[in-house]
Amino acid sequence: MAIVEVKVPQLSESVAEATLLNWKKKVGDPVTEDEILIEIETDKVVLEVPAPASGVLTEIVVGDGGTVVSDQVIAKIDTEGVAGAQAAASVPASPATAAAPAAAAAPAPTPASGAKAGVAMPAAAKLMAEQQLSAAAVTGTGKDGRITKGDVLGALATGAAKPAAPSIPTGVKPPTLPAVAAPVPAPNLGDRPEQRVPMSRLRARIAERLLQSQATNAILTTFNEVNMAPVMEMRKKFQEKFEKEHGVKLGFMSFFVKAAVHALKKYPILNASVDGNDIIYHGYFDIGIAVGSPRGLVVPILRNADQMSFAEIEKKIAEFGQKAKDGKLGLEELTGGTFSISNGGVFGSMLSTPIINPPQSAILGVHATKERAVVENGQIVIRPINFLAMSYDHRIIDGREAVLGLVAMKEALEDPARLLFDI
């Protein structure tokens, strides 16, 4: 037997722990080299762990939901093993099943391949133990067939599940129990089910950083409106040629990025950050682009955005969006940044006050562009208007610089030629 250990990849210095998600293989399954065995979630990204060698998975050291650190052994592979030979090897219980030993002792139905049918959530397992119910008596409606507390209450209310009668050995007289009042039946949740789930590491990290930003920054937001007609006309005029030339559509975000860099050059304090009692002025422009993903909000960075063309910006943003969707963003793509842009307009947002992404000192909020009645030269006309909002740290950025910076972005968008001549 030749055993190869599967270890947690090296995590970044800022990440102390990570959480195992779902094993894609079970003990006894054959695996091939570089096949993905499991995903590991840190507070920033999700990492894939490939098989270091081909063989048979003989042992899973840390189960689903387990907390791990860099280089920790989480599984073992026998490079000379035969599939199915090690199926009886020990597999640690996940936190959900470990929290319910009483329910685990009850017989459970045979789960479908890869599913977790019959596994009870902690609250459900406790209630089943109290009511002396087996997992086979309750149909799970949770994820992967898991049994929720609502499933147990529903089964009790409909009479579909009945407590198992205790077995009494032959010839033994059952004990006489004192008369007690019947227990009050648990309320039937009906169409008001609840489920308690722990935050993912990414969501917990987002919450921590947002609270940190609110607690440590003197956040103030300034607003302005911009007439998007010039940008829309330019985009319409060159969209077909741009896409044919560069293989990517010309969106609005590249204009917002260019306008932001234009303003940051004029007012460098907007691109600065605070370190203790010092102000750090950055001589480069790394723009964070807030992107929604299935696991939460992430902010990948456009490095040296001032040196990027419109096409390069659009390609990079499209790449970030796809990677965020697939959970493939790397730590290096999420680290750093001197200024951020959040585009709530893609979801229909009309106005918001974005929260600064520490240690940055300012963030631009972009919203949906809608036709509105505005006054131009004493006449009421219809124009496509977008409301811009810039939140800034008032500790180092005064209202003058914040307002003028946002006005510079507005002017650049309303007259895109300014971006060409840097005026």
Image (spheres, helix red, strand yellow):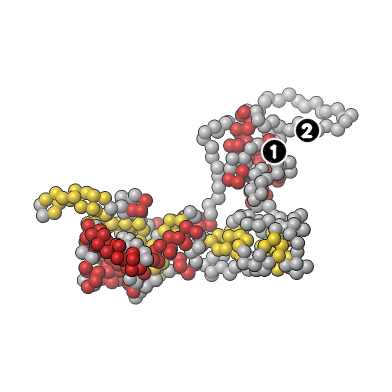
Q: Is residue 192 left or right of residue 238?
A: right
- Front position in the image: 86 or 242: 242
Q: Is residue 7 visible?
A: no
Q: Are marks 1 and 2 in contact (CB under 8 Å)?
A: no
Which numbered tag is attached to residue 189? Answer: none
- Residue sitting farthest toward the right: 171
Q: Is residue 114 above or below residue 53?
A: above
The residue wearing badge 1 is: 136
Which image quarter holds the N terminus?
Answer: bottom right
Kindly identify the residue that appears in the image at 28 percent across and 71 percent down. 265
Label 2 residue SS: loop
Q: Amino acid at mark 2?
A: Pro
CA gap, disc 1 and disc 2: 16 Å
The residue wearing badge 2 is: 166
Q: Is residue 120 visible?
A: yes
Q: Is residue 137 left or right of residue 266?
A: right
Q: Amino acid at mark 1?
A: Ala
Q: Is residue 124 left or right of residue 409?
A: right
Among the 4 quarters of the image, the one containing residue 299: bottom left
Where's residue 66, x and y in %?
A: 63, 57
Which of marks 2 and 1 precedes in the sequence?
Answer: 1
Label 1 residue SS: helix
Kindly identify the residue that appears in the image at 39 percent across and 71 percent down. 303
Q: Is residue 348 left or right of residue 327?
A: left
- Residue sitting farthest toward the left: 378
Kindly identify the residue that appears in the image at 69 percent across and 30 percent down. 162
